[in-house]
Amino acid sequence: MLSLACETRVGAVDLDLVLDVPDGGCLALAGPSGAGKTSVLRIVAGLLRPQRGRIACGQETWLDTDAGIDVAPERRRCGYVFQDYALFGHLSAWRNVAYGLRGVPRARRRRDALELLERFGVAQLADARPGTLSGGERQRVALARALASRPRVLLLDEPLAALDATSAAAAGRELAVLLRELQVPALLVTHDFAEAALLGDAVAVLDAGRIVQRGSAAELAAAPASAFVADLTGAVVLRGRAQAGADGLTHVALDGGGEVVALAPASGAVAVSVHPWEIALEPAGSARSGSARNRLDVEVLSVTEIGNRVRVGLAAPQPLAAELTGASAAQLGLAPGAHVVASWKAAATRVMPR
């Protein structure tokens, strides 16, 4: 078990958080740039000393500012995978991994390094230098090096950020399997909620140095505690003022024009969210059909293929995005400049304070 509590100022951010990660578990710390994510990793690794804090790993106390305990970074045995992987360009892949095998007799280092590279499927690249490797291959070498020292904790800084979309998808699946196999706490930071959902057993959302919500990715997406969390999960977020309607529903007058309705009671300034895949698109001028109570006239701004789905950017009083199948997009003839109707159910509309 890794446990951390700290209070400190880093640049313009006041970090104040408490977190724990069980053995064999992975906590994804998600948030935008400047939220303090990487500083948390540096504090755990001993590379940044907080003004006040305590860190424990199992029965060992690594930091206790009140008691004057501060274990040196090299004694904490953290496997740290940096965002750019930080491989030594002048060393071959196996020698990069062997660098983490401090304390192992020199005669055994190549053998042990090759075994780790084999585990990650890149043993055939043992003699190659990082500059000749793809992004995914560099990531695997970096992970092998991080595990070479038999770490007590694995720290991952934006592990997929340096990869292109295709490489990131494959590397993410491989990394998810690895994290499930390891029996050490893993803490990763990312600005990408999809990455957090793929790799983390739990997700903690960090905003301006504080954890504002923690739970499974599904829990955060289904019930975001704030507009900030909803936006991070990829939901559409609209802002307006709510009041109770005579029909028993909550009516939200949107900033800039238009109105939506929701089931949850609310009043005053609010934010409402809806997932893009819950929004249906219909030809302009279509008569109301089905049970969708929310309907907005919108203009198509962009049409982007994502796997077997299409994400459609929409101009309305506030920006919207819908996701639908390629067949549906083709049937509607969606293209920038087209006018359509966006509709979704009141039950899909989540209401949050703003």
Image (spheres, rainbow, N blue to C red):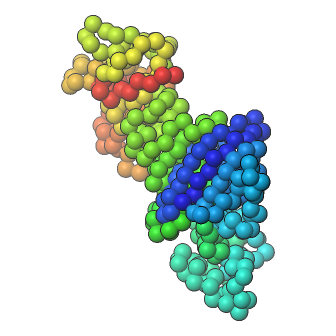
Position of residue 60 measured from the top left corner of the image (x, y, whole percent): 64, 63
**Quadrant of the rendered image containing residue 89:** bottom right
Q: Is residue 251 above or below residue 93?
A: above
Q: Residue at x 67, y 68 (%)?
A: 77
The residue most toward the bottom is 107
Q: Is residue 14 left or right of residue 283?
A: right
Q: In screen coordinates, is 168 left or right of 65? A: left
Q: Looking at the image, which is closer to me, 131 or 240?
A: 240
Regarding residue 44, the answer to whether it shows in the image is: yes
Residue extending farthest to the top is 246
Residue 288 coordinates in the image, percent (x, y): 24, 19
Q: Position of residue 87 (x, y in %)?
A: 72, 68
The front one of 236 and 289 is 236
Res 164 seen here: no
In the displayed structure, 196 sits above or below 350; it is below
Q: Residue at x 76, y 44 (%)?
A: 51
Residue at far front of view:
67
Q: In this rendering, is residue 266 above or below 36?
A: above
Q: Which quarter of the image is occupied by the N terminus?
A: bottom right
Q: Position of residue 50 (x, y in %)?
A: 74, 47
The residue drawn where x is 30% and y is 15% is 249
The residue at 57%/39% (across/down) is: 211
The foreground one among 313 and 11 is: 11
Task: Identify which residue, 283 or 102, lies in the foreground.
Answer: 102
